[in-house]
Amino acid sequence: MRDAGAQTLDAMIDDFVSLGERGVGQTGSRDQMEALLGEPPPEMGIPFERLLGIVRETIVPHCFRTTHPRFLAFIPGAPTFPSILADCLASNANIFAGVWKEASGAAQVELVVLDWFRQILGYPPETRGILTGGGSEANLTALVVAREKIPFDERGKIVLYASEHRHWSIDRAAKIVGLRPDQIRPLACDADFRVRIDTLHEAVASDRQAGRLPWLVLANAGTTNTGSVDPLPAIADFCKREKLWLHVDAAYGWPMSLTTSGRQLLSGIERADSITVDPHKWFAQPFEAGCLLVRRGELLTQAFMMRPEYMQDVVPNHDEINFCDHGIALTRRFRALKIWFSVKLLGIGWFRRLIEHSIALAEYTQGLLEQTGRFEITSPRKLSIVCFRYLPRERKGEGEKERRREKEDLQPAIAEELTRTGRAFLSTTRLNGQSTLRLCFVSWRTTAADVDDVVRLLCEIGARLD
């Protein structure tokens, strides 16, 4: 055991230290992966060294590493080594973190972590929450809590209002809780991709007049597309006046509250009825670590607590928490340990510097892109995201329609070609109906030198494909 453990730790450290010197990853076809890994279950085991070699040399290289300093697609994740070690400790202990009686130590650590998040966001003391597998589960949990007080015979009339740039997990959560597609009302956004308050007012008034039941407003505190933050104070005012539940999806943007400018940007988030945050995004934790905070904490237990006969022995005292009463899962791993461990070891100042570092890199990137003269910025830096398009050179006799089509086709082609180099990975999205390139910075590993390299590659690839 000690020998196998030492080999594993050595492999982990080698990978952690040398990651930036290697490619960002590669994708194999199904046939290729079947040839490498497909087999029936073996009757006899193989030596540990050989098995570890398969993981290191075959499986991991055929995955894109979100931890890599030049993985700048989607919303990456780059955990700290202390959080990785803590996740190993949690897996070894295999603690059932569902009820207080069985794991009071784990439950107390989760309470401490949740209270840290509450303080960072300026939420009131009566807040309760739960750590989840990710933002999708947190958003689903929020919808269930918010719907609990709606009578069954009225649930077919409720309407959810959300930005046209909402995260797809909202639509999936709405489907799971039984909403029809017509019960989700997309809201138009302004030029900065923030929800327009006038469209929200008009939609709610129209639905009330039609006999529907306006129910919940979903506001973004850092969209996946552009990092945009909806006008939270105005939305909070409207929800209070109209008696609507306000849920803020801050899965990506919530750590901005650690900075002075971020607290100003997210002003109004403390007035939400519920907030989703994702520590495994911009808070340097390994997957999986999501979180839901609910202002009126007792609503969590009202929505989820059940006490079957086989759970009679674990009824908590009034000041104790069974986290299985706060969400979907009964069996829960000890997710809080990695967050608590890394904050205790590094200090919250380390995470604040991570946010400032990421913002600075995004600003630096935008400046470099503008200096080249080869790109147009389609969404200026918001939080730590920059969106842009490569501009093809003008050709004699080329019409506007042909030029638009060429520009449209060029963006995903550049992204795909960059991926093939193995040097970096970025993603595309669509803004105002047009394909656009996008870079997101959340990693403590990424440096200005990485940005220089990526922008140089984009220029070279763009010129070659053009």
Image (spheres, rainbow, N blue to C red):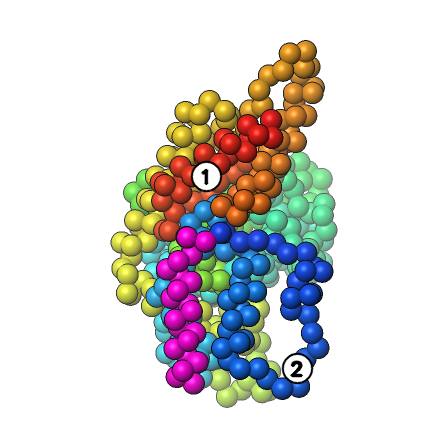
Amino acid at pointer 1:
Val
Element at badge 2? loop
The residue that mark 2 highlights is 42
Q: Is residue 288 left or right of residue 109?
A: right
Residue nearest the viewer, comparing 315 with 356:
356
Q: Give the spatial CA distance, label 2 vs label 1.
A: 44 Å
> How far from the left and from the top, in percent, is residue 248?
49, 49
The residue that mark 1 highlights is 454
2 and 1 marks in contact (CB < 8 Å): no
| Span of residues in magenta | 1-22
**Residue 286 in sight:** yes
Residue nearest the viewer, comparing 241 with 381:
381
Q: Residue furthest top?
A: 397
Q: Is residue 371 left or right of residue 246?
A: left
Residue drawn at (54%, 75%) of the image: 51
Q: Is residue 181 left or right of residue 318?
A: right
Residue drawn at (44%, 25%) of the image: 372
For residue 340, the mark is: none
Residue nearest the viewer, comparing 432 with 411:
411
Quarter of the image where one finds residue 127: bottom left
Element at badge 1? helix
Residue 121 vs 384, above or below: the answer is below
